[in-house]
Structure formats: C-alpha cells, structure tokens
Image (tube, grey):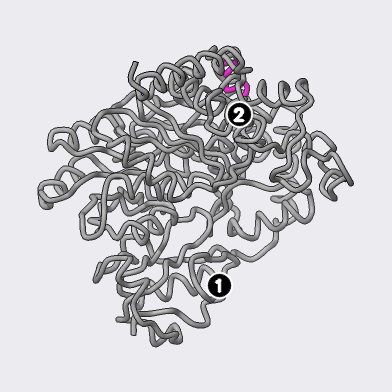
Amino acid sequence: MEPKALEKLKNKAKEKVEERRSPVSKDQATVPIADAMRDYWRRDMLTFSIPAHNGGRGPAPEFTKWLGADAARMDLPMSHGLDTRDRAWKVQSTAQELFADAVGSKQTLFSTNGSSMSVHVALMSVVGPGEQIVMARNGHKSSFAGLILSGAEPVYVDPYHDPDLQIALGVTVDEFQRILEMHPKAKAGMIFTPSYYGTSADVRALAEACHARELPLVTDDAWGLDYALSGHPDLPEGALAQGADLAIGSVHKTLTGLTQTSVLSVGSDRIDMERLQLCFELEESTSASAVLLSSIDGARAQFVREGKELLGRAVESARLMRDLIASEVPELTVVDPDHLASLPGVTAVDPTHVMIETASIGLSGYTADDWLRDERQVDVELVDHRRIMPLITFAHGEEEVERFVGALRDLVDAHADADDNVPQLPSMPDIRTEHVMTPREAFFSKTEDVKPSEAVGRVSAEWITPYPPGIPAVAAGEAYTATAVEYLQEVIAAGGFVEGTADPELKKMRVVA
C-alpha cells in the first residue's frame, strides 16, 4: 500500500477512536460544552496552558471572592483539555450544529465578542472595498464600524420615521426596492429588525426583493433571536424563517446567555461559507471564553426545552404592566402595540418592549430615568428625550412589575408641580444629511478637531451616536448641517450622552481636514 494511502487509513482510524472518546453527543437535550467541562474534571486533567489561573488550582484568583470558585473551575482552555489540539472531539462545532438545527440555519457561529463582532463579520462576508451595499440608515453603530472595516460603500435607505412618536421604524418595501433599482451594482442588502422599540420589518418581502436580483439579505435581528427558538404566537416570526440569508442574534438580549454572547446564522447558499469562516477568524479572539461559549450552548438547550413557557411569562408580565399603568398611573401614556403595528414599515410588534411616554407629564425620559434609579432603585433599558422603555423578559414576574408600576406612581406624584422639561428636538428626517465619502475614507483621512459652530458643512470623521438607541445621528463620511449640530448639542444639554466620538461632551468634533 502507498505511504499516503496508509497514512490516510491511520488518520481515519484515529478519528474513529477520538469520536468514541469524545464527551459530547449531538442531541438537543445535551449541552456539549458544559458536558466537556464536567468531563475535564472527571478525568482529573492537569494542563500547563492558559488561562494562568489554571482552573483555580493554586492561589485563588481575586474574582472568585465575588464570582465563586466555579467561575475559575469552568474557565477552561478549549484546545487543551475541553477538546483535543486538533478539535477532534468536535465540542464547539457540535454545539454550533445543534444551535443551527434549533433555529433552522445551515450553519451557526458563536461569538463571544457580542453582536458587534457578528455585524462586522457579516458585512465583510458580503461586501468588500469599493463595493456597494444597500443598508437601512437606522443601523446600530457597529454596522457603521463594519463599513469602515470592510471598506464598502453604503447606499442608505431611510426607514419610516413616525412624526408623532419621533422614532425610526422599519424600511418600507417600496423604498427598499426603489433604492435597489437605482443601484444595480449593489452586492447585498442589510436591514435592522426588530428595532430597539420592538417593531419588525417585512423581512419576507425585503428578502424577495434582494433575491430577485440574486443578492443576499443580511438582518441584524439582535433583539429577535428568541423569535427563532420559541414559536410563541404573540411574538413576531424570526428573520431566518422569512428568508434572511445571514442573521445576527444577541443571546444575552432575549435568551439566557451571558452578556457579550451572540450568534451568526446562515440561511442560504447565497453566503460564501468559506469567506464567512475566514472573516470570522479575522475578528474572533484566539482565546474565546469557554464560559461564554457554554452559556450560548445552554441557552439553546433551555429554550428548545422550555422557550415557549419562558417567553409566555414575559408576554404575560408585559400585558400586566400595561394594564396596571392604565389603572394606577393613568397620567402616563403607554404606546399601544396595535398602533405601532399599523404604521408603515412595521409588520409585527414585540409586546415585551413597553414604551412609556413621560412627555405626557412634562418630563424628559432622562429626568424620569434618573429619578427612578436614584430614588426607587429601578432602571430601564432605553431612554430618550421623551420616553422610557422597560424591557420585559422571562426574569420579570408579578412582583417585579408591581414594584415598577409603584415607582412610576411615585415618579408622577413627585413631579406634580414640576416645570415641563421635555426638549423640542429636530426630527430625524431633518437631521439626515448628505453622504459625501465612504465611512472608511472619512475615518482614515487626515482630520482636525473643530468647535461645533465650525463643523457645519464639514465631513464627519467619526460616528456621533446618541445612546440609546445607538443609531449614529451623523456617520463618518456625512456632512454636518446646522440642524444636525443643534440636535446633538440639545441631546447633551437634555441629559443624554453620545458614543463614537473623540469628545463625548461635543466641545469639539473630528472632521476631515
């Protein structure tokens, strides 16, 4: 027998031996990474590799004083004990395959650098330097960072902006198709759904518009990963089920994963899997946390097993909150999900995003949030100039809801005689400005810092992002207008803050020289 053929047979035999030794199995009831962790200690493994604390064997790491010894015991090296050097036991790949099966994707990759990393990878996978992508303009700041990394040229599609609520919802199908037709050289489309406010766009129709041109549709549905796993009748349909080609989901936002966990799922053959994997390796840590990875794996197992019940608890708690506010704090206006669902660019609404208008009692959302946190030790997910939005999850039951509503009652009573402090900000359509150069060109250009009054007419070299909701008001490559500068200064004055800028106080702005 030829040496090469003999070596091949030996390798196959070795693979079969390692498969038998592997501590994991491909079954939705299992948690492969956690199974490998338990097996590591059962085998009494001793490793001379990172992490330096070596599972907490020697002097206890300081973090065990507040996280406990198990935090160190389970912070283990993936390729030095949890799996073999060449990943022959397929610990992580099995976990990813189980997740893919659960959400109906062709492949799922685990990110321990959050959905920001997933967005970067998704963009680099479908567009490169100088190539066009038709992208909704209400993207999270990570998408604009992804444009800088990829070098792609964005063709922005403005979402529908509701003038009464002063929020951006989804892009309409007609507007998305119009922009696609105007840019036949575009390589992909990208949308952000559900929005931070819980509104879902018509992914099915938007995907069909892309597919008619043989283009992939990327969806940043960081806030909607639970849709794909629960099948709950009161929640919207997931993006993958509607035809998305590459979908991004935050495990920690709606499931039971630890903070900073995310998944990137492939929905069709329109995605180059090899390029996707290579782009992922460009961005991911070479020392990905097994603890974080195991929490992704565990979240999948838990939601496959009891996701409908868990999310049913969240939906019921959100319904209770709306009912209690209506009866006990009638001065506050809660936005009706049915009203949201009737607006352009919206096909469904997640009821667990409860929008409460503090402007109805003359309070800015910033003032209300500060008072609730400082005086009643209650905080919320989203705050803007005129509202607060508690995010209701499976973790919230009747007790938590009643405490929150009680705090709202106290808020209203404490500000019965307060002056109206709701700022009158320009609308987002008025802030939208001209796209002068690509974000990458602007970011890497020679720059200078100028006073806000001197920024009008200049091209931004940063992405100034009121947070939340985390959507850049002015992105790198866009020209400042007087209205945009005025808006940003008023956000700061009202109590908001911005990210993506060299000076968060906006006493200076970084512009292309």
Q: Which mark is residue 81?
A: none
Nearer to me, 331 or 300? 300
Rendering quarter of residue 340: top left
Residue numbers of the magenta segment: 306-313
Above or below, comparing residue 493 to residue 287 in the picture: below
Above or below, comparing residue 191 to residue 398 in the picture: below
On the image, the x and y values in percent for residue 148 come to 36, 62
Drawn side of residue 92 relative to residue 474, left or right: right
Looking at the rendered structure, the secondary structure element under dot 2 is: loop
Which residue is denoted by mark 1 in the rendering?
504
The local crowd at label 1, few if under 14, some if 14 to 19, many if 20 or more residues have their Cα within 10 Å, is: some
Residue at 70 percent across and 27 percent down: it is: 37
- Quarter of the image with the C terminus in it: bottom left
Residue at 49 percent across and 71 percent down: it is: 501
Whether residue 308 appears in magenta in the rendering, the answer is yes
Above or below, comparing residue 270 to residue 95 in the picture: below
Nearer to me, 174 or 150? 150
Drawn side of residue 46 relative to residue 334, left or right: right
Which residue is denoted by mark 2 in the rendering?
83
On the image, the x and y values in percent for residue 199 come to 41, 38
Confirm or deny contact between disc 2 and disc 1 (CB under 8 A): no
On the image, the x and y values in percent for residue 16 come to 51, 13
Residue 418 visible in the displayed image = yes
Whether residue 27 appears in magenta in the rendering, the answer is no
Tell me which amino acid carries mark 2.
Asp
Above or below, comparing residue 383 to residue 233 in the picture: below
Looking at the rendered structure, the secondary structure element under dot 1 is: loop
